[in-house]
Amino acid sequence: MSRTILHVDLDAFFCSVEENENPALRGKPFAVGGKPNERGVVASCSYAARTLGVRSAMPMSRAIQLCRDLIIVPSHHNLYSEVSARVMEKLHNLTGLVEQISIDEAFLDISDMSEPVERIARALQAGIKNELHLPSSVGVASNKLVAKIANEVGKKSGKKKNEPPYGLTIVPAGEEEKFLNPLPADMLWGVGPKTSARLTELGIHTIGDIARWNQKDLVNLFGENGRDLWQHANGIDNRPVTTESETKSVSQEVTYNVDVRDEKTLEKTLREQAREVARQLRKNELAGKTVKLKIRWSDFTTLTRQTTLPTSTDNEDEIFHTAIKLMKTVRKQNQPVRLIGVGVSGIGEPIRQLSLWDVGSEKSRKLQDVVDVLQEKYGKGVIKHGDDLVE
């Protein structure tokens, strides 16, 4: 039976949140990110800034050269997480089949809904805009792969001067290949810079070019990735939308807009991720024994490393320190990182014992319970970890 999958992506999410917090920023060229004199980069930029040549992942010093009046806004990750949670709650109100894949995007399976898909998608966009004051774009297809690519195409074709695209692209079932064929090969999942360069050498420039190649030849050239390339180029993707209804693992990951070499920045990200994973575990009265680190280098090589703890944990510090140890086993000094993530699996009910880092005592547990209650009531920013106060 054909599925109907939505890929929802919030447009210029960080900037949209900042505009809601400070309406005076609307229509002005501004960028979220680090300071130019500290080798900061643009994490996100307003549409007014984009018309002047400013782009995400650009050094902030270069952005200032392009736009002398550029307003620089520091990142507020706790705020972005809180707003993201409200968006995801809205998606769950539409269907229980929601898979969040990053802070600003998710897949929804609406196969069982009888309303016309365009009406559903437009109503969802309107609801996110009117209730949360956030722009979004939607891609619709019979599988996750094509839905995400459809959204990318819609965002590019729907660009307007100084405004979000509010893209909506629907690929009818059976037309996946027709839709994908003319698109550039590097829009396909699994085609990083090295693979793209090799495909160009072979005279392969579009997704259709990949689809027309013999699958065995692609496997000989690219290994198992060649099989995935052929299937994806032909619009084949049977992965289901994975929900949290049966929690087998809890994880957080982020793809940086520009590769990160700074050790402190990576550690700060791991701390934030460990904190959120631990919070989700406690909220659902769960704990896990296996901590996993996911890391992707600038050439798109992706590694995972994991370790199993003596006892189950739902503690931020234990997850964080374990993730740091795992990172140090695989990362060379100054090695650039494109993506990093932390997860906990081996999920079950928490066992209250002294943890690996001597932080599982009854006193520590009571303190953490109080913190959880305060953050649930007043927001995650009401109490900060000491690490967050150190620049």
Image (cartoon, rainbow, N blue to C red):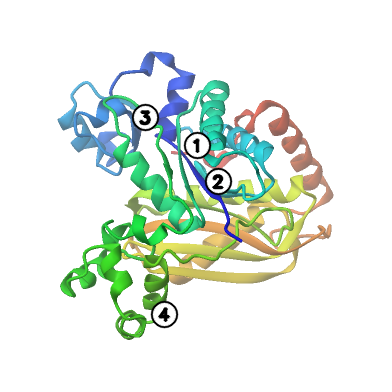
Q: Residue 364, position in %: x, y? A: 77, 46
Of callouts 2 and 4, the N-terminal one: 4
Residues at marks 3 and 1, CA–CA distance in whole angstroms: 21 Å
> Which image quarter is the N terminus in?
bottom right
Do the numbered discs 2 and 1 sit on residues whose CB atoms are within 8 Å?
A: yes
Q: In this view, does 356 lie above or below 220?
A: above
Residues at marks 4 and 3, CA–CA distance in whole angstroms: 38 Å
Of callouts 2 and 1, the N-terminal one: 1
Q: What residue type is labelled 2?
A: Glu
Residue 204 vs residue 324, the one in the foreground: 204
Using residue 55 as the reference point, say whether residue 301 is left or right of it: right
- Among all residues in the image, which is located at the extreme top? 24
Q: Residue 2, position in %: x, y? A: 57, 58
Q: What residue type is labelled 1?
A: His
Q: Is residue 164 above or below residue 222?
A: above
Tag nearer the camera, 2 or 4: 4
Q: Which amino acid does label 3 sit on?
A: Pro
Q: What residue would you read off at disc 1?
A: 77
Q: Residue 189, position in %: x, y? A: 39, 62
Residue 190 vs residue 312, the one in the foreground: 190
Using residue 189 as the reference point, say whether residue 288 is left or right of it: right
Tag 1, which secondary structure?
Answer: helix
Of callouts 3 and 2, the N-terminal one: 3
Which mark identifies residue 164?
Answer: 3
Q: Residue 295, position in %: x, y? A: 45, 63
Q: What residue would you read off at disc 4?
A: 224
Of callouts 4 and 3, the N-terminal one: 3
Residues at marks 4 and 1, CA–CA distance in whole angstroms: 37 Å
Q: What residue would you read off at disc 2?
A: 272
> Which image quarter is the C terminus in?
top left
The local crowd at label 4, few if under 14, some if 14 to 19, many if 20 or more residues have their Cα within 10 Å, is few
Residues at marks 2 and 4, CA–CA distance in whole angstroms: 34 Å
